Image: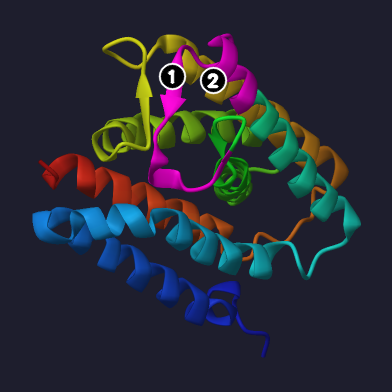
Amino acid sequence: MERSPFLNNNKEVLFLVIMYFVGIVGHLIPSTRNLMITLTPFTLLLTGGVVTYKSFLPSDHKFLFWGITTYLITFLLEVIGVKTGLVFGGYNYGPALGFKVFEVPLIIGFNWVLVILGAISIGKSYSKNIILISLSTAVLSVMFDYFLEPVAINLGYWQWDQISVPLQNYLAWFLIAFIFSIVLLKIKPDFKPGVSKEYFLIQFTFFIILNLFMR
């Protein structure tokens, strides 16, 4: 009998759940919050590495090409955004997300790839239509960022030039996620999502809980 994808990935999913549960507790305890912030880029690299291992390494060159291209283009868009404010609005990154190139943390492009991939994987669970999947990917990505923003600002990941998050930011998220979703579904519609869907949901839950309880 063939094992279900969840059973095949249960060790990785359990690891991700434990990591983010520890992160929730650590962020909610004031005395350990600074440690959690310091560990943020390493945590993202480690947990994202697990997702990459389960998603990209077993796949062919088309899927890997999409991942690398998405990383490079989203990183470039972030650089343009920080320098000009034309993409997302005026903002700047703090030190919390680790080493930066052109004032943008290197981990940012990686997280873009994983967020979009996870949202696509969720959409593929409910539809086979490329446009519908891409639209759901865009909506889910915007929702993800909506709950991410207050936490990110509170923890010093980045700061906006204006008091509230600009609408331009959410429009950019929608378009970027929509476009890269269509590209992946065109070149590799049968890609194996690995644990990308679970990772998206775990991170989403993480930010919702911190929004509710972190002061």
Whole-angstrom CA distance, mark 1 to mark 2, is 6 Å
Secondary structure type for disc 2: helix
- Residue placed under numbered mark 1 in the picture: 91
Residue occupying the point 30% across, 31% down: 153
Residue 165 in view in this figure: yes
For the residue pair 14 and 124, the one nearer the viewer reads as 14
49 sits left or right of 64 in the view: left
19 w.r.t. 92: above or below: below
Q: What's drawn in magenta, residue-wise? A: 78-100
The picture places residue 23, in percent across and down from the top left corner, at: 28, 61
Amino acid bearing label 1? Tyr
Residue 43's image quarter? bottom left
Going from the N terminus, do you reach mark 1 or mark 2 first?
A: 2
36 w.r.t. 170: above or below: below
- Residue placed under numbered mark 2 in the picture: 82
95 inside magenta stretch: yes
| Quadrant position of the C terminus in the picture | top left
